[in-house]
Image (spheres, rainbow, N blue to C red):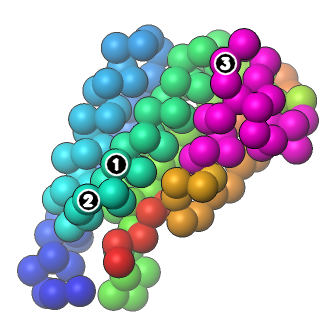
Amino acid sequence: MNESLSATAARIVPQVLPICGEHQIGEARRAAAAMLHALGFQGPAVNYAVTAVSELAANLVFHARCQQVMTLRPLRVGSCTAFEIVAEDGGPGIDSLVDAMRDGFSTNGGLGAGLPGVRRLMDEFEIRSKPGVGTTVVARKWLR
């Protein structure tokens, strides 16, 4: 990575976005696209990460009941840069992560492609959930 891109990445501030309504899904997408471009991401990588943000934000709106927040931030490890999404809620949690990560499984009549799709679109994916407590999803896309 060139030095100017590295310096730019160091100046980008994390954004914490409340996600309580559908209009905030679009706001999260726009914030993600701006951050990704500022970090030097281009082409399909931007589209993949913005789609992941959209899917996770939609999950917060349609499944969580309270304390929904999405954090978008640059991540630096040595000379490598990543875009990180953290979606957290204090909602009902997920009864079965195995089912939730299976293509086609849905609890709200959707396509059941959201979480498995995010896992495929991003380079790293982690999900933690406890019924009655909430869910946290962390996903990263590394700048190549």
Sequence-wise first label, 3 or 2: 2
Secondary structure at numbered mark 2: loop
Horizontally, residue 84 falls left or right of residue 42, namely: right
Classed neighbour count for the residue bearing mark 2: other residues with Cα under 10 Å, few (<14), some (14–19), many (≥20): few
The picture places residue 55, in percent across and down from the top left corner, at 52, 33
Residue 134 in view in this figure: no
The picture places residue 139, in percent across and down from the top left corner, at 55, 55
Q: Residue at x 34, y 14 (%)?
A: 23
Secondary structure at numbered mark 3: loop
Question: What's the residue type where badge 1 is placed?
Answer: Asn
Q: Which residues are magenta?
A: 96-118
Q: Which mark is residue 43?
A: 2
Q: Which mark is residue 110?
A: 3
Where on the picture, by quarter, is residue 59? top right
The one nearer the camera, 96 or 19, is: 96
Question: What's the residue type where badge 2 is placed?
Answer: Gly
**C-alpha separation, residue under disc 1 versus residue under disc 2:** 7 Å
- Name the quarter where the C terminus is drawn: bottom left
Q: Are the two marked residues, 1 and 2, in contact with CB atoms closer than 8 angstroms? A: yes
Q: Residue at x 42, y 70 (%)?
A: 142
The one nearer the camera, 13 or 140, is: 140
The one nearer the camera, 113 or 137, is: 113
Residue 116 in view in this figure: yes
Q: Is residue 100 magenta?
A: yes
Horizontally, residue 38 falls left or right of residue 24, namely: left
Above or below, 74 relative to 133: below
The one nearer the camera, 120 or 63, is: 120
Question: What's the residue type where badge 3 is placed?
Answer: Gly
Sequence-wise first label, 3 or 1: 1
Horizontally, residue 87 falls left or right of residue 94, namely: left
**C-alpha separation, residue under disc 3 versus residue under disc 1:** 21 Å
